[in-house]
Image: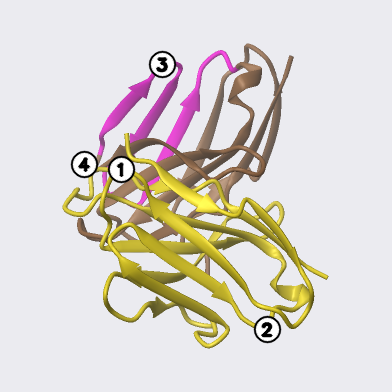
Chain colours: A yellow, B brown
Amino acid sequence: GAVVSQHPSWVICKSGTSVKIECRSLDFQATTMFWYRQFPKQSLMLMATSNEGSKATYEQGVEKDKFLINHASLTLSTLTVTSAHPEDSSFYICSARPSGQGGTYGYTFGSGTRLTVV
Amino acid sequence: TQLLEQSPQFLSIQEGENLTVYCNSSSVFSSLQWYRQEPGEGPVLLVTVVTGGEVKKLKRLTFQFGDARKDSSLHITAAQPGDTGLYLCAGARGFGNEKLTFGTGTRLTIIP
Protein backbone atom coordinates (compact mmCIF):
# COMPACT_ATOMS: atom_id res chain seq x y z
CA GLY A 1 0.00 0.00 0.00
CA ALA A 2 0.89 3.63 -0.35
CA VAL A 3 3.20 4.91 2.38
CA VAL A 4 3.87 8.51 3.31
CA SER A 5 6.80 9.27 5.58
CA GLN A 6 6.99 12.50 7.52
CA HIS A 7 10.08 13.77 9.29
CA PRO A 8 10.76 14.78 11.98
CA SER A 9 8.10 13.31 14.23
CA TRP A 10 8.61 16.08 16.70
CA VAL A 11 10.75 19.15 16.96
CA ILE A 12 11.36 21.84 19.54
CA CYS A 13 12.78 25.12 18.34
CA LYS A 14 13.46 28.56 19.69
CA SER A 15 11.27 31.47 18.80
CA GLY A 16 12.53 33.25 15.70
CA THR A 17 14.18 30.23 14.12
CA SER A 18 12.97 28.27 11.10
CA VAL A 19 11.96 24.64 10.96
CA LYS A 20 11.70 22.36 7.92
CA ILE A 21 9.32 19.41 7.79
CA GLU A 22 9.65 16.76 5.09
CA CYS A 23 6.90 14.67 3.54
CA ARG A 24 7.96 11.77 1.32
CA SER A 25 5.92 9.30 -0.67
CA LEU A 26 7.95 6.11 -0.29
CA ASP A 27 6.46 3.81 -2.89
CA PHE A 28 4.59 6.05 -5.26
CA GLN A 29 4.80 9.36 -7.06
CA ALA A 30 2.56 12.25 -6.16
CA THR A 31 2.16 15.41 -8.19
CA THR A 32 0.06 16.86 -5.41
CA MET A 33 0.51 16.75 -1.67
CA PHE A 34 -1.46 18.50 1.03
CA TRP A 35 -0.37 20.12 4.27
CA TYR A 36 -2.68 20.29 7.28
CA ARG A 37 -2.49 21.77 10.72
CA GLN A 38 -4.26 20.29 13.72
CA PHE A 39 -4.73 21.92 17.09
CA PRO A 40 -5.33 19.79 20.20
CA LYS A 41 -8.70 18.10 20.24
CA GLN A 42 -9.64 19.62 16.90
CA SER A 43 -10.01 18.45 13.34
CA LEU A 44 -7.59 18.96 10.47
CA MET A 45 -7.41 22.33 8.77
CA LEU A 46 -5.96 22.44 5.26
CA MET A 47 -3.09 24.90 4.98
CA ALA A 48 -1.98 24.49 1.40
CA THR A 49 -1.82 22.28 -1.65
CA SER A 50 1.69 21.46 -2.78
CA ASN A 51 2.13 21.06 -6.53
CA GLU A 52 5.22 19.43 -8.04
CA GLY A 53 7.15 21.87 -10.14
CA SER A 54 4.92 24.85 -9.46
CA LYS A 55 3.84 27.17 -6.70
CA ALA A 56 1.78 25.92 -3.83
CA THR A 57 -1.82 26.99 -3.42
CA TYR A 58 -2.51 28.41 0.02
CA GLU A 59 -5.83 28.45 1.83
CA GLN A 60 -7.32 31.73 2.88
CA GLY A 61 -5.69 33.12 5.97
CA VAL A 62 -2.46 31.11 5.65
CA GLU A 63 0.63 33.27 5.25
CA LYS A 64 2.59 31.97 2.30
CA ASP A 65 5.74 33.84 3.35
CA LYS A 66 5.64 32.24 6.75
CA PHE A 67 4.84 28.72 5.64
CA LEU A 68 7.11 28.03 2.69
CA ILE A 69 6.27 24.97 0.63
CA ASN A 70 8.56 23.34 -1.89
CA HIS A 71 7.61 20.34 -4.01
CA ALA A 72 10.76 19.81 -6.02
CA SER A 73 10.24 16.16 -6.91
CA LEU A 74 7.41 13.70 -7.33
CA THR A 75 8.20 12.10 -3.98
CA LEU A 76 9.10 14.99 -1.71
CA SER A 77 7.35 18.08 -0.41
CA THR A 78 8.73 20.27 2.35
CA LEU A 79 7.06 22.76 4.66
CA THR A 80 9.30 25.38 6.26
CA VAL A 81 7.92 27.37 9.15
CA THR A 82 9.91 30.58 9.07
CA SER A 83 10.57 32.80 12.07
CA ALA A 84 8.54 30.48 14.24
CA HIS A 85 6.63 31.81 17.22
CA PRO A 86 4.87 29.99 20.07
CA GLU A 87 1.52 30.38 18.31
CA ASP A 88 2.90 28.25 15.47
CA SER A 89 3.15 25.31 17.84
CA SER A 90 0.88 22.64 16.46
CA PHE A 91 0.63 19.22 14.85
CA TYR A 92 1.44 19.40 11.14
CA ILE A 93 0.36 16.55 8.84
CA CYS A 94 0.87 15.91 5.14
CA SER A 95 -1.07 13.66 2.80
CA ALA A 96 -0.77 12.35 -0.73
CA ARG A 97 -2.29 9.95 -3.20
CA PRO A 98 -0.57 8.20 -6.13
CA SER A 99 -0.68 10.29 -9.29
CA GLY A 100 -3.42 9.09 -11.57
CA GLN A 101 -5.33 7.32 -8.83
CA GLY A 102 -8.90 8.46 -8.99
CA GLY A 103 -11.24 9.99 -6.48
CA THR A 104 -12.57 6.67 -5.32
CA TYR A 105 -9.34 6.17 -3.41
CA GLY A 106 -8.57 7.89 -0.16
CA TYR A 107 -5.45 9.74 0.76
CA THR A 108 -2.51 8.42 2.74
CA PHE A 109 -1.37 10.60 5.60
CA GLY A 110 2.01 10.98 7.18
CA SER A 111 2.39 10.32 10.89
CA GLY A 112 2.57 14.02 11.63
CA THR A 113 5.10 16.43 13.12
CA ARG A 114 4.62 17.91 16.56
CA LEU A 115 6.18 21.38 16.53
CA THR A 116 6.79 23.18 19.79
CA VAL A 117 8.19 26.70 19.68
CA VAL A 118 9.69 27.94 22.94
CA THR B 1 -15.71 27.62 8.12
CA GLN B 2 -16.43 23.95 8.77
CA LEU B 3 -18.68 22.65 6.04
CA LEU B 4 -19.01 19.18 7.53
CA GLU B 5 -20.55 18.89 10.96
CA GLN B 6 -20.13 15.69 12.88
CA SER B 7 -22.24 14.53 15.78
CA PRO B 8 -21.78 13.69 18.46
CA GLN B 9 -18.56 15.54 19.18
CA PHE B 10 -17.72 13.19 22.03
CA LEU B 11 -19.01 9.71 22.76
CA SER B 12 -18.10 7.38 25.59
CA ILE B 13 -19.82 4.00 25.72
CA GLN B 14 -19.36 0.57 27.19
CA GLU B 15 -17.75 -2.27 25.27
CA GLY B 16 -20.33 -4.26 23.34
CA GLU B 17 -22.71 -1.39 22.71
CA ASN B 18 -23.65 -0.05 19.29
CA LEU B 19 -23.17 3.52 18.13
CA THR B 20 -23.71 5.80 15.16
CA VAL B 21 -21.71 8.85 14.14
CA TYR B 22 -23.20 11.37 11.74
CA CYS B 23 -21.56 13.65 9.21
CA ASN B 24 -23.77 16.35 7.76
CA SER B 25 -23.39 19.13 5.24
CA SER B 26 -25.50 21.45 3.16
CA SER B 27 -23.11 20.92 0.26
CA VAL B 28 -22.92 18.06 -2.22
CA PHE B 29 -19.72 16.04 -2.36
CA SER B 30 -18.43 13.77 -5.11
CA SER B 31 -17.14 11.36 -2.52
CA LEU B 32 -16.87 11.09 1.20
CA GLN B 33 -14.15 9.39 3.17
CA TRP B 34 -13.96 8.25 6.76
CA TYR B 35 -10.72 8.22 8.71
CA ARG B 36 -9.69 7.17 12.21
CA GLN B 37 -6.89 8.96 13.98
CA GLU B 38 -4.94 7.81 17.01
CA PRO B 39 -3.20 10.33 19.29
CA GLY B 40 0.08 11.55 17.81
CA GLU B 41 -0.55 9.87 14.47
CA GLY B 42 -1.94 10.82 11.09
CA PRO B 43 -5.45 9.77 10.04
CA VAL B 44 -5.88 6.33 8.53
CA LEU B 45 -8.43 5.76 5.79
CA LEU B 46 -11.33 3.47 6.66
CA VAL B 47 -13.54 3.78 3.60
CA THR B 48 -14.50 5.90 0.62
CA VAL B 49 -18.12 6.17 -0.53
CA VAL B 50 -18.96 7.59 -3.91
CA THR B 51 -22.51 6.76 -4.94
CA GLY B 52 -25.57 8.30 -3.30
CA GLY B 53 -27.23 5.72 -1.06
CA GLU B 54 -24.12 3.53 -1.07
CA VAL B 55 -23.55 1.28 1.92
CA LYS B 56 -20.15 -0.25 2.70
CA LYS B 57 -19.26 -2.64 5.46
CA LEU B 58 -15.88 -3.11 7.06
CA LYS B 59 -16.22 -5.89 9.65
CA ARG B 60 -18.27 -4.30 12.45
CA LEU B 61 -18.32 -0.87 10.80
CA THR B 62 -21.08 0.13 8.39
CA PHE B 63 -20.81 3.30 6.34
CA GLN B 64 -23.61 4.94 4.42
CA PHE B 65 -23.58 7.83 1.97
CA GLY B 66 -26.78 9.85 1.82
CA ASP B 67 -28.92 9.70 -1.30
CA ALA B 68 -28.21 13.37 -2.02
CA ARG B 69 -24.49 12.95 -1.25
CA LYS B 70 -24.64 15.61 1.44
CA ASP B 71 -24.35 13.42 4.50
CA SER B 72 -22.96 10.15 5.76
CA SER B 73 -23.10 7.92 8.79
CA LEU B 74 -20.82 5.43 10.48
CA HIS B 75 -22.37 2.68 12.55
CA ILE B 76 -20.28 0.47 14.81
CA THR B 77 -21.73 -2.77 16.11
CA ALA B 78 -20.53 -4.31 19.36
CA ALA B 79 -17.89 -1.67 19.98
CA GLN B 80 -14.51 -2.77 21.28
CA PRO B 81 -11.77 -0.84 23.10
CA GLY B 82 -9.71 -0.97 19.91
CA ASP B 83 -12.34 1.22 18.25
CA THR B 84 -11.31 4.13 20.48
CA GLY B 85 -10.06 7.10 18.51
CA LEU B 86 -10.94 10.26 16.64
CA TYR B 87 -13.24 9.60 13.69
CA LEU B 88 -13.16 12.10 10.87
CA CYS B 89 -15.29 12.35 7.80
CA ALA B 90 -13.90 14.22 4.82
CA GLY B 91 -15.64 15.31 1.65
CA ALA B 92 -14.20 15.86 -1.79
CA ARG B 93 -15.55 17.67 -4.80
CA GLY B 94 -14.31 16.19 -8.03
CA PHE B 95 -12.28 13.09 -8.76
CA GLY B 96 -8.81 14.42 -9.38
CA ASN B 97 -6.30 15.58 -6.79
CA GLU B 98 -8.99 17.56 -5.09
CA LYS B 99 -8.56 18.84 -1.57
CA LEU B 100 -10.54 17.38 1.27
CA THR B 101 -12.85 19.22 3.61
CA PHE B 102 -12.69 17.57 6.99
CA GLY B 103 -15.52 17.23 9.42
CA THR B 104 -15.40 18.53 12.97
CA GLY B 105 -14.52 15.09 14.32
CA THR B 106 -16.00 12.63 16.81
CA ARG B 107 -13.89 11.47 19.69
CA LEU B 108 -14.95 7.96 20.62
CA THR B 109 -13.98 6.18 23.83
CA ILE B 110 -14.92 2.57 24.41
CA ILE B 111 -14.84 1.58 28.04
CA PRO B 112 -13.80 -2.03 28.71
**Residue A62 seen from this side:** yes
Give, as a three-letter code, the residue at label 3: Lys
Residue behind mark 3:
B59
Please identify the quadrant where the N terminus of chain A is shown: top left
CB-based contact (under 8 Å), mark 3 and mark 4: no
Give, as a three-letter code, the residue at label 4: Thr
Residue behind mark 4:
B51
Q: Is residue A11 left or right of residue A50?
A: right
* B69 within the magenta span: yes
Image x and y of residue A48, in percent: 44, 72
Front tag of 1 and 3? 1
Residue behind mark 2:
A83
Chain under label 1? A
Distance Cα–Cα, label 1 vs label 4? 29 Å
Distance Cα–Cα, label 2 vs label 4? 45 Å
Distance Cα–Cα, label 2 vs label 1? 33 Å
Classify B43 as above or below B74. Answer: below
Q: Secondary structure at mark 2?
A: loop
In front here: A109 or B27? A109
Distance Cα–Cα, label 1 vs label 3? 28 Å
Residues tagged by mark 3 and mark 2 found on one chain of the structure: no
Circle 4 residues within 10 Å: few <14, some 14–19, many ≥20: some
Residue behind mark 1:
A27
